[in-house]
Amino acid sequence: MLRKILGEKYGGVKLAVSYGSRRPYSDIDILIVSDKIEPAFNWWLDLAVIPEAEFKRLLGLLDISVTDPLFSGNA
């Protein structure tokens, strides 16, 4: 799905994790680590994009914005 949505920018994805409620008819939440992709949101897809350096910093701080997707999501 991400390959189709992102097109050639897909090659810039370092990590992509699907997380969130996973309920039928709810949006799809995806954490993406990339220096080449912009965040995006519409009614069915929420792409939270974090540059690699910021991801590493937040991970070192055990920030919930990156630890929750990592522990509860699917890579």
Image: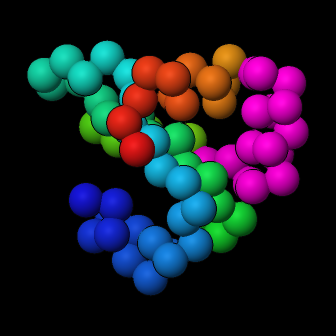
Q: Quadrant of the N terminus?
A: bottom left
Quadrant of the snapshot with the C terminus:
top left
Please report the bounds of the magenta region as a residue range: 49-63
Where residue 8 appears, as percent x and y from the top left, is 44, 82
Image position, residue 37 (x, y; %): 60, 64
Residue at 68% x, 18% y: name it: 64
- Foreground of the two, 30 or 62: 62
Residue 42: x, y in percent?
38, 41
Number of numbered discs on residues = 0
Residue in view at x 44 percent, y 21 percent:
72
Is 50 in the magenta?
A: yes
- Residue at point 46% right, 72% down? 10
Question: Relative to 46, does residue 32 appear above or below in the rendering?
Answer: below
Say which residue appears at 15% left-offset and 24% top-offset: 25
Q: Residue furthest left?
A: 24
Q: How is the image coloured?
A: rainbow
Prevailing secondary structure of the magenta residues: helix
Magenta segment includes 64: no
Compared with 37, 57 (above or below) is: above
Of residue 21 and residue 73, the one placed in the foreground of this image is 73
Q: Is residue 14 visible in this depiction of the protein?
A: yes
Q: Is residue 16 above or below residue 66?
A: below
Is 24 situated left or right of 48 in this image? left
Is 53 situated left or right of 74 in this image? right
Q: Is residue 67 left or right of residue 57?
A: left
- The answer to whether one can see residue 42 in this image is no
Q: Is residue 27 left or right of residue 7?
A: left
Residue 61, quarter of picture: top right
